[in-house]
Image: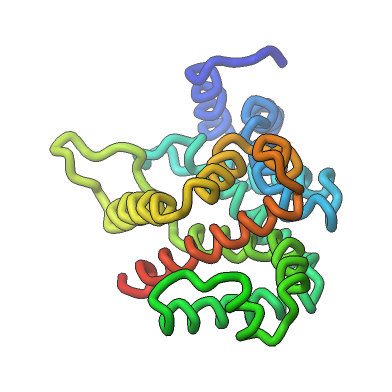
Amino acid sequence: MSELSSEQKSELLLRYKSTGNKALRNEVVLAYMNIVKYAAVSTRNMYLKYADTDDIINEAVIALMNSIDSYDTGKNVKFETYASIKVRGAVIDYIRKQDIIPRNIRRFVREYDIAYSELFNKLDREPTPAELADFMKLPVGKLESYSAQASAAHMLSFEEMVSSVDFDIPDEPSADGVWSSEAGIYHREKIEYLAKAVESLTERERLVVTLYYYEQLRLSDIGRVLEVSESRVSQIHSGAVIKLKRYMSDYMNSV
C-alpha cells in the first residue's frame, strides 16, 4: 500500500467504522503500522536483551486492531493519539507480564529506590554513589554494575507510573477554550509536571532522557554520542528515571 495522507487514513478508518468490513480493517491496520513500529522502537531498551522483537510487534498489532474497534469517532480525540497510547500501553503491559527482569535486579531496584528516598530526605540533596553504596552495604563497583543492569527495570516502572491515567481525552479544548473533561485537565497537568521534572535533572541526565525518549536512540548509540560506555549511559539513565519517579510520585500522590 502506498503512503496515505492523514485525510485518506481518516476516511479509511471512518469507512471501516461505518461498515464493519474486515477487509477495510486490514487496510486501516496497514495504514497505521507506523504506530506499531514506534511502540516497538521506543521500548526496545526494555526488552532487547530479554525478548524477541517479533513478539513485541505482534502484541502491538493486536493492540492496534483493538484500538481500531474500540475507537469512538464521536469523541474529540485524534485516532493517532488514542491508538498510540493504547498500543504503547499494551506493549508495556506485555513486557511486564513476561517477567523478563531477573529477580535479583528487581530486588535491587526496590532496595535502591528506598535507599535513595531515605538518603535524599536525610541529606536534603541527591546522594552520591558512595553514600548509596554505604547505605546499601555494597561495594561501589557492584552498585554501579547493578545500576547498569537495572536500567530496563527502571524504564518499565517509570513507564507504568506515567501511563497509569485514562487518556481517552480530547486533543484540543472546546470552542470556549475549556477542556471538556477532568481527565483532560489532569493529562495536561501531568505533562506540565513531567516537563518540570525533566528540567530538574542535570544537563547530562536531560541529554540522555532526550536522546532516549525523543530521539529514540539505543543506549549504545547514546554512549557513542557522549563518548562513554553503554554501561555508563545505563547508570545515568537509571539515575534520571529515579529522580523523575520521585518527582512524579509527589505529584501523583497529591491529586
Residue at the (43%, 37%) spot, across then down = 73
Where residue 90 appears, x then y in whole percent?
A: 64, 54
Up/down of 209 relative to 92, above or below: above
Of residue 14 and residue 136, the one placed in the foreground of this image is 136
Q: From where the camera sits, is residue 36 visible? A: no
Residue at the (47%, 69%) spot, across then down = 126
Residue at the (62%, 55%) spot, across then down = 236
Q: Quadrant of residue 208?
A: top right
User: Residue lying farthest left?
Assistant: 176
Q: Quadrant of residue 60?
A: top right
Is residue 48 shown left or right of residue 144?
right
Up/down of 139 relative to 69, above or below: below
Is residue 252 shown left or right of residue 46?
left
Q: Quadrant of the C terminus?
A: bottom left
Is residue 136 shown left or right of residue 171?
right
Q: From where the camera sits, is residue 22 visible? A: yes
Q: Quadrant of the N terminus?
A: top right
